[in-house]
Image (spheres, rainbow, N blue to C red):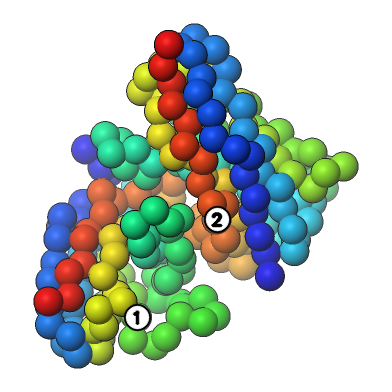
Amino acid sequence: QVQLQQSRPGLVKPSQTLSLTCAISGDSISSNNAAWNWIRQSPSRGLEYLGRTYYRSKWYSDYAVSVQSRITINPDTSKNQFSLQLHSVTPEDTAVYYCARGYCGGDCYSFDYWGQGTLVTVSS
Amino acid sequence: QSVLTQPPSVSAAPGQKVTISCSGSSSNIGNNYVHWYRQLPGAAPKLIIYDNNKRPSGIPDRFSGSKSGTSATLGITGLQTGDEADYYCGTWDTRLSAVVFGGGTKLTVL
């Protein structure tokens, strides 16, 4: 059974960097049949896809245009986890952040396992 | 404003059938698979339909999905009070190069 365990919630000040990790058990981050995603949810923006990392002979990361200029998603193979960094945050980045596995038996864009969610509040 | 359009709410009596629609365009639903999620309060979304009409292991056949053109539909038969939740559709959008979601539909089982 795949499980995704997210790092604990936090308060981030405006203009600083939001950092989260997602530890994977029951699967390998280097799997050729999965992609590892970050998605957030807020009352004002609903569910919003942020980006992903995945391994296909080499590592790839791709990001939603809405956050492309200030996001980094990296794998950590030594810990079987992946991370999210979102730079220059504003109060609009306040949301519950989820990590999720993309199932690549189909198109990789169905998310079959999710982390528990982490509330991140951006406030001074 | 979500890229995919869902009704804000639907309701039906226990034992009845309900359908939830998801409307998009040729850049998303029209040319990509649609997936459906159920979200209970305070919990993460859960995948209930993938690739338009496939059910993950453990999802009962009371749940079904279909797609026609630029719209998709989630069907739930034999409604139970435990089906009360928010339901979301999602798909890849080729123009936006991102996964997009509907705004969610709150199902009430009266």
Q: Is residue B31 visible?
A: no
Amino acid, disc 1: Phe
Q: In the figure, B37 relative to A15: above or below?
A: below
| Pointer 1 chain | B
Q: Secondary structure at mark 1?
A: strand
Residue wearing tag 1: B63
Task: Tell me the crowding category of disc 1: few under 14, some 14 to 19, or many 20 or more residues within 10 angstroms, Cα based.
Answer: some
Residue for badge 2: A114
Please tell me the numbered disc located at residue A103. Answer: none
Disc 1/disc 2 C-alpha distance (Å): 20 Å
A30 to B109, vertically: above or below: above
The quarter of the displayed image where residue A74 is located: top right
Give x and y (percent) for residue B46. Answer: 45, 64
Q: Position of residue B93 (x, y in %)?
A: 40, 46
Dot 2: chain letter: A
Q: Residue drawn at (64%, 54%), measured in percent from left and top?
A: A4
* Residue A118 visible in the current orientation: yes
Q: What's under tag 2, amino acid-wise?
A: Trp
Residue A68, position in %: x, y? 52, 24
Q: Residue at x 54, y 63 (%)?
A: A112
Question: Which quarter of the figure is the N terminus of chain B placed in?
Answer: top left
Secondary-structure class at tag 2: strand
Instruction: Check if mark 1's residue and mark 2's residue have beta carbons within 8 Å.
Output: no
Q: Quadrant of the C terminus of chain B?
A: bottom left
Query: Quick check: A61 above or below B85?
Result: above
Q: In the displayed structure, would residue B92 be above or below residue B15?
A: above
Residue neighbourhood size for the residue with mark 2, other residues' Cα within 10 Å, grouped as few (<14), some (14–19), many (≥20): many
Please tell me if label 1 and label 2 are on a single chain: no
